[in-house]
Image (spheres, rainbow, N blue to C red):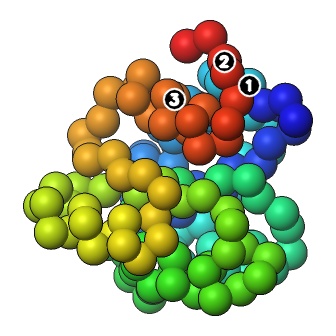
Amino acid sequence: MTIDKKAVLIVDDMKTVRVKLKRLCKELGILQVYEAMDGVQALEMLQGRKVDLVLSDWNMPNMTGLELVAKMRENTRTVEVPVIFITAENEKGAILKSLMSGVTDYIVKPFPDVTVKQKICGALKVQVKI
């Protein structure tokens, strides 16, 4: 499947981060980009649509990124969907905890655009000139 057929869900309580990540996805050629402000809203969106990748913050109100991943891994529809955390949590223990909970990859804020693009392509298993 080509990248323009992929769908990405961005989950972050900060609108500026969602806008930046959406722009990076569009620059890669991803046409279906959805946004959620927290894990609760993300789970609702995941019930009604298929996504190929979730980009999520860790620390959010209502439901954290870790709680979101736990719920996704319990559901047969979302158990295999890759999740990349994009968060300010940079302690080694936090990174390890997230990876052990089912997170696919981890990016520490602030992040270089090229790093995000590379990790998105890796998670989606597509090759795009960056």
What quarter of the picture does the C terminus occupy? top right
Please state which amino acid type lies under the numbered disc 1: Gly
Label 3 amino acid? Answer: Lys
Judge from the rendering whether residue 25 lies leftward or rightward of residue 48; answer left or right.
left
Say which residue label 1 marks. 29
Q: Is residue 54 left or right of residue 80?
A: left
User: Which residue sits at x=60%, y=66%?
Assistant: 36
- Of 17 and 127, the residue lying toward us: 127
Q: Residue furthest front?
A: 100
Location of residue 44 (image quadrant): bottom right
Q: Which numbered disc, 1 or 3, marks the residue that appears first in the sequence?
A: 1
Q: Is residue 66 visible?
A: yes
Q: Tell me the tag on residue 117.
A: 3
Q: Does residue 58 appear in the picture of this structure?
A: no
- The first of marks 3 and 2 along the sequence is 3
* Contact check, label 3 and label 2, Cβ < 8 Å: yes
- On screen, 130 above or below 126? above
Residue 128: mark: 2
Q: CA distance from mark 3 to mark 2?
A: 9 Å
